[in-house]
Amino acid sequence: MFGGVIGASTEQVVGAAVPTSLGSVKEQASSFMSKAQPWRQFVWPLSVPSANEGCSRISANVFNYQTNYAILFVVQLVLSVILQPSALMCIIVTVITWVLFLKKNEDPDWAPKLGGVVLSPLQRWLLLAAITTIVLLLWVGGVIFNAALMYLLFFLAHGLLHDPAGRSVPGGDPVPI
């Protein structure tokens, strides 16, 4: 069952997770965006549910609009970072660091040592990834947490108030919950 993953080298696994070209990223984003439901259906109809209908509404809306929710979360997170100057500067410095590092990491003559041990390109990559994670959590973590909390409140309000029974398929009857 896990033979393909267990037999793969770490470089192959990491390489598979990192996009190889901008075209690949655009294809994946386009494929993801095409899964979104129409925004008009996402917004309307709204109504206050009965007490026993709330959980089923949230479940139905998560199922129907998961891509829309993900798109809105990313947009809200990006806006939160842009509107917070310290978070934006941290992201910019991090991106510049990664660009410079990736250029330098391709140099076969570069052999930095840590504790007397020469680091391989993959080890250098993983070390910078760990440092990046810590720095982003310290400087941007509050912004990310606040954005996620505000989005959670929006998500629950929309999931509760949006009536999934009012959603209809083209040429058909309303979709049951």
Image (tube, rainbow, N blue to C red):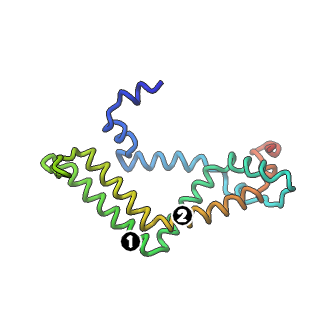
**Residue 125, percent from left and from top:** 29, 49
Q: Earlier in the sequence, mark 1 or mark 2?
A: 1
Q: Is residue 143 above or below residue 61?
A: below
Dot 2: element:
helix
State how far apart marks 1 and 2 are (Cα): 18 Å
Foreground residue among 142 and 160: 142
Q: For the point 32% across and 48% down, which residue is it? A: 126
Q: For the point 32% across and 33% down, which residue is it? A: 9
Question: Which residue extends farthest left?
Answer: 109
Q: For the point 48% across and 68% down, which residue is it? A: 81
**The C terminus appears in which quarter of the rendering?**
top right
Foreground residue among 20 and 130: 130
Q: Is residue 58 above or below residue 16?
A: below
Please give left or right for residue 46 compared with residue 8 in the image: right
| Of marks 1 and 2, the one in the foreground | 2
Residue type at numbered disc 1: Met
Quarter of image, res 93? bottom left
Q: Which mark is residue 52?
A: none
Q: Is residue 27 above or below residue 82?
A: above
Look at mark 1 in the image and give the residue it sits on. 89
Foreground residue among 18 and 136: 136
Foreground residue among 149 and 25: 149
**Residue 113, percent from left and from top:** 17, 51
Local crowd at mark 1 within 10 Å, few (<14), some, or many (≥20)? some
Quarter of image, res 11? top left
Q: For the point 36% across and 27% down, which residue is it? A: 7
Please give left or right for residue 10 compared with residue 77 in the image: left
Dot 1: element:
helix
Q: Which mark is residue 145?
A: 2
